[in-house]
Amino acid sequence: MAPIDKDKRIPPDVLILIPEDVARHYKMVPLALSGNVLDVGLVDPDDVKAQEALNFLVSRNNLAVQVFKISEDEWSKLMEQYAGLGEEVGEALEGLRREINQEKEKVGQFETIKGKKEQEAPIIRMVETILKHGIESKASDIHIEPTMNKLRVRFRLDGTLQTVVVLPVEIAPAIVARIKILSNLQIDETRRPQDGRFTTKIGEKEVDLRVAVLPTTRGEKAALRILDPAIGLRTLPELGIIGRNLEVIEKGIRKPFGMILMTGPTGSGKSTTIYGILQILNTDAVNIVSLEDPVEYYIDGVNQSQIRPELGYTFANGLRQILRQDPNIIVVGEMRDSETAGLAAQSALTGHLVLSTLHTNDAIGVIPRLINMGVEPYLIPSALNVALAQRLVKRLCPDCKKEIEPSERIKKIILDVVESMPEPSRPKIFAKGEKESFKIYKAQGCPKCNNKGTKGRIAVFEILEMTPQLEAIVISEPTESKILAESQRQGMITMFQDGITKVLEGIIGFEELVQVVSITSSDDSPAKDGSVSGEK
């Protein structure tokens, strides 16, 4: 075997095969799983007791084992990858197995554990442990998924799903049943999807969880969205809206009427941006009413209503109703059809500030999209204040990011992008005469970021402001190319330009940016999506 890579990330489903306490006692660590062969590193491969313990563990999982000698230093470094989840779930699992065996002796088959106080049941502890670690690790979602021979638990961390623990598939019904109980869902209904919600307390902090249960061929899958107010309710600068972009947004929301429209793909943070704006607007002097599907974060002082299409309570019908509630500010979760778009535009024209979302590739595309949805072009300039597009990019870990010299290719891309930006919006470093000597940052990996090199996410933005000059174009010839040219002449920066600013400030890495905002164009200037030619 090649020399051990101490920094190699061991998959959680491999790590959990040897409990942390056993690994520490016998100075061993699982390295990899190939088929049914588990590679294990031992500081002392000749230790008879360590061999016996290892053989017991692998035989229990029907695995073969391959042992490699590792140094004490390698073992210590690899042991840092153990998290508490595996151990805590493992303890609960062992308790569950004991109770299952007891139940089997009594009734001959597994049933939901009964006759025990709820707080003593291993299933309860197991679900609590999964929730606790999901929240503490700042996961946005928890997926509990039955497969053919295992129950997989995955966390979405910084936008990426990661397996954190693998459990016996036979306990899947009990796990999902527990989640249904917490969410006030029908336990005996397994044939159709169900949605619910519940609140849990971790330490002194209360966190909401939105639950969606889906029947699959292997059983019911549960997806839990973690709605932590400490993460989800943030200020606009914390979200990544800075400089000119912040000025445009603040100017747009200070107007007593008009539309503020957010656009971007699912999961790009549009709702979080709306909540950030609402925190500014939410005062005793205004009446704010929202229509959401679903309500994610509860905000004191905002009248939040969840639509129910199955009952005929749609965005369009709800919008008609809330206009009777004497609102100053209206939030429409999403413009899904022409009727909703038309009503929202009319509301904006009749003295209301309207916040909503829709799906386009960029801020420029909002205007053609409104026209396609039936809003008359001559109404759009008066109705639209600001259009905002965004994407989420992984933020570099501040504890381990490394300053590097960019390659000539990357350097040229950055210089071309910066040269195309309006002078007031250019990164400060170029104002200091350091054009040829700038550096960027690269993800490294450390224990504080679980060796990922990134920690959390931040948004890159493209914000279009409606102006008299742009109004003339929208009314006469609203093509995307003309709208783009005029917006850039007025100082708008694209998502890629905003991202490059954050790259130069060390907030995100160049690689992380181009994974989200592509680099494609047919000429030498930044493309409409903020990209640069010559790169694929």
Image (cartoon, rainbow, N blue to C red):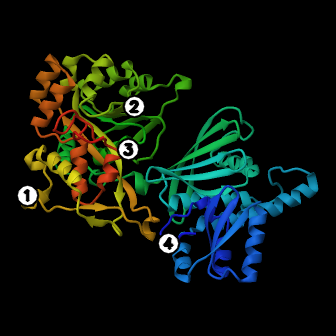
Circles 3, 2 touching at the beta carbon (< 8 Å):
no
> Measured from the top left, where is residue 200 in percent x and y?
57, 56
Upstream in the sequence, badge 1 or badge 2? 2
Badge 1: residue crowd in 10 Å (few <14, some 14–19, many ≥20): few
Badge 3: residue crowd in 10 Å (few <14, some 14–19, many ≥20): many
Circles 1, 2 touching at the beta carbon (< 8 Å):
no
Provide the secondary structure element on which disc 1 rests. helix
Distance CA(mark 1)–CA(mark 2): 41 Å
Amino acid under disc 1: Ala
Upstream in the sequence, badge 3 or badge 1? 3
Please state which of the two labelled residues, at mark 4 or mark 1, is closer to the viewer.
4
Upstream in the sequence, badge 3 or badge 2? 3
Q: Which residue is mark 3?
A: 269
Q: Is residue 211 left or right of residue 376?
A: right
Residue 334 is marked as: 2
Amino acid under disc 3: Gly
Provide the secondary structure element on which disc 4 rests. loop
> Measured from the top left, where is residue 227 in percent x and y?
48, 50
Upstream in the sequence, badge 2 or badge 4? 4
Q: Residue at the location (18% across, 26% down)?
A: 481
> Visible in this render: residue 350?
no
Q: Which residue is mark 1?
A: 431
Please state which of the two labelled residues, at mark 3 or mark 2, is closer to the viewer.
3
Amino acid under disc 4: Lys
Residue 6 is marked as: 4
Distance CA(mark 3)–CA(mark 1): 32 Å
Circles 4, 3 touching at the beta carbon (< 8 Å):
no
> Measured from the top left, where is residue 475 in percent x and y?
16, 18
